[in-house]
Structure formats: C-alpha cells, structure tokens
Image (tube, helix red, strand yellow):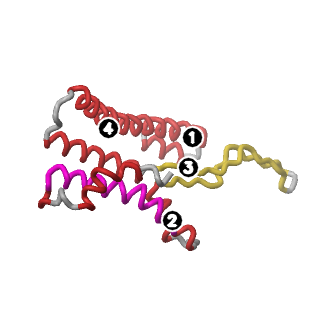
Amino acid sequence: AEVATANACELGDLTACQVRLVTRINALNSTIQWLPATILAVYFGFLVWMLVSWREIGRGEVALLIIGSLVLLVGGVLNPMMNIEAKINELSFAIWGQPMRFTNQVVFFQSKSIFDVVHLMVLGPKSTAATILVGGAIGLFSIGFPSLKLMASFVYHYDFRALRKSRLVQFFALESGKWSMADV
C-alpha cells in the first residue's frame, strides 16, 4: 500500500494520493486504538477479579498491580492529552484575475502530553516564574506523587530493607491518595 501511495503521489494524481493516504491512516488508527483498550481491559479485569474473589492478595498479585499501575501511569503521562489545531475551512480570492480556492487547510497543529506541557512550562523559551511554578505543580502532582506512591507501595508491601516503618514510605503508600487530584 505504501508503494502504491508513493507512486500515486509521485505521478501527481492528487485525488488517488489523498484517497490512499486516508485509507492508510484509517487502517493505522484502527490498529492503534485496540491496543490501549486491550491493556485497560486486562488490567481492570484483573483488578475486578481480585476484588470479587475476596481473598488476601498475594505477593505476585501486588507486584502485578503495581507494574500495571506503572504502565498506565507512563502511558497517561506520555500520551497526548490535548490537540490544538487551527484550520481554514475555505479561503478563496483572486490573483491577477485568476480565482484561487483552498479548502480544509490545516494551518497549525500541536499535540501535547502532560510531560510535554510540564517540560514546555518549566524549560520553554517563554518560561516565567508563574509558568515554572504551575508547571512544577503539575509535574509534582501528575508525575511525582503517583510515581512515589507506586514505589512506596512496593517498598511497604515487600518491606524492602525494613523501610515499612519509615514515615515517608507510610505517607506515600498509605496517606498520599488525597493528593492524587491536586493537579486538576
């Protein structure tokens, strides 16, 4: 399909090129959409199974939950959370008496993840004290707290190096849940 698309585009057949590109994009989108849904379904299926079984959760199951939560956290932080698009639906004018018409022109497009937004606010060329403060708060509560909570949960459950009694580990493992929506 890629060779046919390239040939159609090289030959100047714009309509065939556009049709082939749209077909290819749709095929890729359908492939991309089932993978996150499958990951979420498996994770939540496992979670529901453990809640319904009403038994003590074993060490392996806790590790699977923490690893699954980490995968979801990384996916949530790195996947786009917003798309910005500036588009001209139709523009027509005349140059030297010849009509010119443009339709469906994308002038600007940007896609940003939480990580991209934090990076831009803190280290961007137009960073100010206010944007650094807000970006730092978003980074702390969207990336820092959840990561520390997962690590502390692992350390607390497995009593890694007898750190279960540490006040910091106890705070992040048991008490930091109330901070989970602070970034919002």
Left or right relative to 71: residue 8: right
Q: What residue appears at the point 43 percent right and 61 percent down from the top-left corner?
A: 139
Separation of residues labelled 4 and 3 (CA atoms): 23 Å
| Pointer 4 or 3: first along the chain | 4
Magenta residues?
Answer: 133-159
Pick the front one: 158 or 13: 158
Question: Which residue does the numbered mark 1 point to in the structure image?
Answer: 18
Mark 1 vs mark 3: in front:
3
Q: Quadrant of the N terminus?
A: top left
Q: What residue appears at the point 52 percent right and 53 percent down from the top-left corner?
A: 111
Separation of residues labelled 2 and 4 (CA atoms): 29 Å
Q: Where is residue 12 in the image (x, y as percent from the top left)?
A: 58, 46
Mark 4: secondary structure: helix
Q: Where is residue 134 in the image (x, y as percent from the top left)?
A: 52, 64
C-beta proximity under 8 Å, tags 4 and 3: no
Pick the front one: 132 or 13: 132
| Pointer 3 or 2: first along the chain | 3
Q: Main secondary structure of the magenta part?
A: helix
Question: Which residue does the numbered mark 2 point to in the structure image?
Answer: 120
Residue 92 is a magenta residue: no
Residue 83's disc is 3
Question: Which residue does the numbered mark 4 point to in the structure image?
Answer: 39
Separation of residues labelled 3 and 2 (CA atoms): 15 Å
